[in-house]
């Protein structure tokens, strides 16, 4: 009987302040969507760093007029170097074929690029990726060498940008979360004030504080959980339509987000939305609204 009464009070309270309830749900949805996206981005950047740094290479580009003798001497030096783990030679034809394959979804770029602009090179994997400077000092000035490019330096710039996006997404999520909590607190205050007479009567007949406060707390939890479900639905839609849809061509560059990570966000978002809403409602009732 008590459970039925509590649930009816929750539904009545939600309907009585329907506009504020909708606003609360929308705000929770936006903030939790940003939170989920920032967490996915955080985990994905860490995964990408581990993946790409393990496969990082140093490219030693050769001059266009390099001789066979210079090419052979460089190859022998690299294979005999204690710094080098693996050496792979890439001819100009191979570089052109790889370029065409990598950018097959950008035909205009392929047409604008000439085969002659892609020099032959040696792709070098180091035993210790931090020894790039030693390799450059040893082979960078050899005859026939045009340039030595450390892919790790290029990756650092990319990950610095992704790190900035991480911080931005998390900052927006925190701001949105603060706005959602304020809206939850305000909605609970309005709901409690509108039912002040009923509350007074219940206290006169001996109802406990937790029994009086429970419907208000459940209203906030309902809004938080519904917002979390909508936020999760937004992440699923983004995965289906964008990550696996229009952005699928970038899978060779950016590691795809797996469905396991997406499903992990469901309990995280529901826990965050429901628990934080419940705590906010309880604190509001405890310290600001005398019920």
Image (spheres, grey):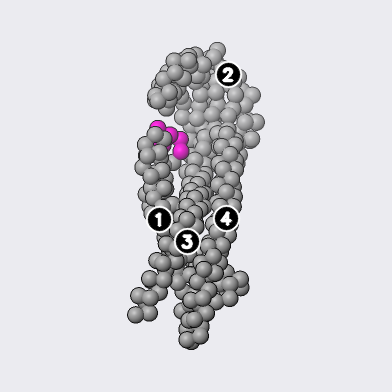
- The C terminus lies in quadrant: bottom right
User: Which of marks 1 and 4 precedes in the sequence?
Assistant: 4
Which residue is found at the position 49% from the left and 43% from the top? 48
Circle nearer the N terminus (3, 1): 3
Residue underneath mark 2: 144
Task: Say whether disc 3 or disc 2 marks the residue closer to the N-terminus.
Answer: 3
In this picture, which residue range is highlighted in magenta? 248-254
Q: Position of residue 46 (x, y in %)?
A: 51, 48
Question: Residue drawn 49% across and 81% down?
Answer: 201
Q: Which mark is residue 17?
A: 3
Q: CA distance from mark 4 to mark 3?
A: 18 Å
Q: CA distance from mark 2 to mark 1?
A: 61 Å
> Picture coordinates of residue 136 (x, y %)?
62, 31
Q: What secondary structure is found at the residue carrying circle 2? A: loop
Mark number displayed over residue 229: 1
Which labelled disc corresponds to residue 179? 4
């Amino acid at each position: 009987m008590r459970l039925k009464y509590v649930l009816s009070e929750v539904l009545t309270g939600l309907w009585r302040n329907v506009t504020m309830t909708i606003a609360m749900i929308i705000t929770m949805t936006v903030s939790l969507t940003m939170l989920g996206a920032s967490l996915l981005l955080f985990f994905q950047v860490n995964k990408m760093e581990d993946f790409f740094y393990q496969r990082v290479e140093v490219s030693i580009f050769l001059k266009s007029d390099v001789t066979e003798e210079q090419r052979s001497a460089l190859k022998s030096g690299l294979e005999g170097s204690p710094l080098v783990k693996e050496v792979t030679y890439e001819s100009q034809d191979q570089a052109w074929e790889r370029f065409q394959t990598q950018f097959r979804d950008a035909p205009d770029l392929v047409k604008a690029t000439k085969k002659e602009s892609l020099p032959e090179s040696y792709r070098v994997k180091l035993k210790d990726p931090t020894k790039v400077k030693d390799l450059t000092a040893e082979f960078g000035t050899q005859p026939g060498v045009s340039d030595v490019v450390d892919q790790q330096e290029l990756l650092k710039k990319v990950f610095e940008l992704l790190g900035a996006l991480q911080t931005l997404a998390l900052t927006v999520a925190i701001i949105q979360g603060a706005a959602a909590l304020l809206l939850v607190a305000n909605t609970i205050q309005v709901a409690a004030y509108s039912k002040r007479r009923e509350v007074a009567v219940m206290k006169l007949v001996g109802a406990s504080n937790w029994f009086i406060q429970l419907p208000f707390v459940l209203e906030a939890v309902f809004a938080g959980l519904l917002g979390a479900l909508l936020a999760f639905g937004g992440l699923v839609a983004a995965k289906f339509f964008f990550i696996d849809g229009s952005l699928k061509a970038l899978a060779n560059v950016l590691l795809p987000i797996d469905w396991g990570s997406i499903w992990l966000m469901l309990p995280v978002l529901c826990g965050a939305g429901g628990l934080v809403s419940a705590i906010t409602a309880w604190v509001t009732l405890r310290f600001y609204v005398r019920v």
